[in-house]
Every structure is written in structure tokens, then in C-alpha cells.
Image (cartoon, grey):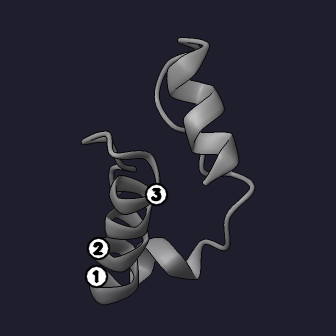
Amino acid sequence: MASAYDDVLHGVGPLAHDHLPRSLFDDVGQFEALNQVLKDSTGLDMGWHRA
């Protein structure tokens, strides 16, 4: 979550995902849960996009 917040705060572009396990993006449920935790943690409507 901290790296996602840094990406947005410092305006470096899309949220990086290469530091996360690829399996998170292959499973729709885990992917949606990850984005929800990010929104709940930061209060911002942001998230990763599936490739």
C-alpha cells in the first residue's frame, strides 16, 4: 500500500505492480480485494489495473 501511495503522491504515473506477486492480478477476487484495501487505507479512489 505504501508504494501505491508514493506512486500517486509523487505523480510518477500508474501504480507499479512489478513488486507484487503476479498471481494477485490473475485472480479477480484477490485483485478486487487488493484495490479495496488500497482505497480503505488511503481514502483515495485509486487502484491497479489488470494487464
Looking at the image, residue 32 sits to the left or right of residue 24; the answer is left
Alpha carbons under labels 2 and 3: distance apart: 14 Å
Q: Which of 51 and 24 is in front in this view?
A: 24
Q: Name the residue under label 2.
A: 32
2, above or below 9, in the image: below
What residue does disc 3 label? 41
Residue 7 coordinates in the image, percent (x, y): 59, 27
Identify which amino acid the numbered label 2 is placed on.
Answer: Glu
The image's mark for residue 28 is: 1
- Looking at the picture, how far across and down is residue 31, in whole percent? 37, 74
Residue 51, visible in the rendered structure: no
Crowding around mark 2 (Cα neighbors within 10 Å: few <14, some 14 to 19, many 20+) is some
47 on left or right of 8: left
Q: Nearer the viewer, mark 1 or mark 2?
A: 2
| Residue toward you, 32 or 21 | 32
Vertical comparison of 34 with 19: above or below: below
Q: Tags 1 and 2 in contact by the CB under 8 Å rule?
A: yes
The numbered dot on residue 39 is none
Residue at screen point 39% across, 50% down: 48
Q: Residue at x 68, y 42 (%)?
A: 3
